[in-house]
């Protein structure tokens, strides 16, 4: 009997140790990626893999949250070292959760100021056509249905342009500037209003600065599509620097719009905010609106990958307000189209 009791006690202790080991491994599995994301968000190291990791800064909250739940379980059920360690880690994690929530709070604590607007609102639409593969008639349909006044299209190819023109693009938008190109380098702006003073940006892909004669005043529109942060991300940083230079010397009300290949957690975007630009989704309190990948464009093990990253943006200077923003799925492209309703302040 004594031998049997000893064996039972040994088995019980072993099972308990395995449970605590698994719990510890789960905590580590949550903490390591979360801490890595926090570190790269703060330090902004070079290298495309680190730049891409910054994109997932909002998701660190989920990792930290799961780690806290596991640690609370250990705090309640554990004793001695387990309880002390769990309590200490909870105290360490809570400020990090608060930091990430503060970083992500922009789209929820903006200051909509529609009552301060002067003149009529105007709507800007941005859509990456994904090598020109987006459904051409759907692009035109969505733009017209949403009363778009200025349409910015990136990755627009000659074939895509011809097909959209056949679908009524020129009738809806009689003014156009920019260039098409095979692959990803084409960028064009279509407008109900007159476009003028066009200058190309010194970026890898097509980018253009121009004036738009909206009814109340002329504004500067900068259509952008920086290189994605691949490889060592040098082209990505250089393109964003070119965008910042163009934005810095533009006069009056300025609208930056396009596929930035960056989230608001990336330093180049934070630099733009530091120079007086604000994200339209933030200003309009639109909530988080991820635009990539477009829903149902990718699948893993048969499950559709939801939109995860907000890399398409409309940024405005303080002379402008944002009344609303929204995103829409367009078949054939891996980006959701983004709309922003703006007005002069």
Image (tube, rainbow, N blue to C red):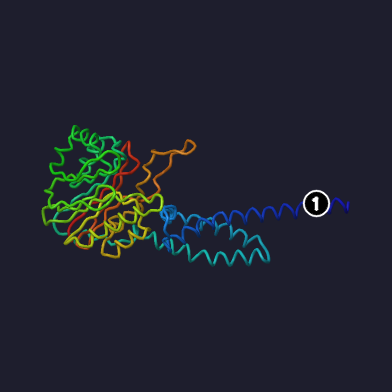
| Residue at x 43%, y 42% (from the top left corner) | 305
Q: Is residue 21 left or right of residue 285?
A: right
Q: Which residue is mark 1?
A: 8
Up-down relation of residue 68 to residue 196 (above or below)? below
Residue closer to the observer: 67 or 247: 247
**How far from the left and from the top, in percent, is residue 11?**
77, 51
| Residue at x 27%, y 52% (from the top left corner) | 203
**How far from the left and from the top, in percent, is residue 169?**
18, 37
Residue closer to the observer: 260 or 181: 181
Helix, strand or loop for disc 1: helix
Q: Is residue 88 left or right of residue 165?
A: right
Up-down relation of residue 14 to residue 171 (above or below)? below
Quadrant in the rendering for residue 141: top left
| Residue at x 30%, y 65% (from the top left corner) | 274
Residue closer to the observer: 288 or 271: 271
Residue closer to the observer: 133 or 283: 133
Q: Is residue 155 left or right of residue 87?
A: left
Up-down relation of residue 140 to residue 32 (above or below)? above
Quadrant in the rendering for residue 155: top left
Image quarter (top left, top right, bottom left or bottom right) of the C terminus: bottom left
| Residue at x 35%, y 58% (from the top left corner) | 108
**How far from the left and from the top, in percent, is residue 176?**
15, 44
For the residue carrying disc 1, how many other residues have a C-alpha within 10 Å: few (<14), some (14-19), or many (20+)? few
Quadrant in the rendering for residue 162: top left
Tally of numbered tags: 1
* Residue 58 can be seen in this image: no
* Residue 142 can be seen in this image: yes
């Amino acid at each position: 009997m004594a031998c049997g009791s000893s064996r039972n006690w040994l088995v019980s202790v072993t099972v308990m140790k395995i449970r605590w080991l698994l719990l510890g491994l789960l905590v580590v599995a949550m903490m390591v990626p979360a801490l890595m994301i926090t570190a790269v968000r703060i330090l902004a190291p070079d290298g495309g893999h680190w730049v891409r990791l910054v994109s997932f800064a909002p998701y660190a909250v989920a990792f930290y949250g799961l780690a806290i739940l596991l640690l609370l379980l250990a705090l309640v059920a554990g004793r001695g070292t387990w309880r002390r360690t769990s309590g200490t880690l909870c105290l360490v994690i809570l400020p990090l959760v608060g930091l990430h929530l503060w970083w992500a709070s922009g789209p929820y604590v903006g200051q909509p100021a529609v009552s301060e607007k002067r003149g009529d609102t105007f709507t800007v639409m941005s859509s990456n056509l994904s090598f020109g593969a987006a459904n051409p008639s759907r692009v035109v349909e969505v733009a017209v249905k949403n009363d778009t006044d200025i349409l910015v299209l990136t990755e627009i190819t000659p074939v895509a342009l011809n097909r959209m023109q056949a679908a009524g693009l020129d009738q809806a938008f009689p003014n156009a500037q920019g260039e098409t190109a095979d692959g990803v380098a084409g960028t064009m702006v279509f407008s109900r209003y007159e476009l003028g003073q066009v200058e190309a940006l010194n970026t890898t892909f097509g980018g253009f600065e121009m004036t738009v004669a909206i009814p109340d005043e002329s504004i500067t529109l900068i259509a952008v599509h920086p290189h994605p942060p691949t490889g060592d991300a040098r082209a990505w940083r250089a393109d964003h620097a070119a965008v910042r230079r163009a934005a810095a010397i533009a006069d009056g009300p300025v609208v930056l719009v396009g596929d930035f290949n960056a989230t608001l957690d990336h330093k180049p975007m934070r630099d733009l905010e530091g120079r007086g630009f604000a994200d339209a989704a933030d200003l309009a309190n639109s909530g988080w609106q991820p635009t990539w990948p477009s829903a149902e464009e990718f699948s893993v093990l048969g499950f559709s990958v939801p939109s995860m990253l907000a890399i398409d943006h409309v940024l405005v200077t303080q002379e402008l307000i944002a009344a609303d923003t929204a995103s829409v799925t367009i078949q054939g492209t891996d980006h959701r189209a983004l709309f922003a309703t703006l007005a002069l302040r």
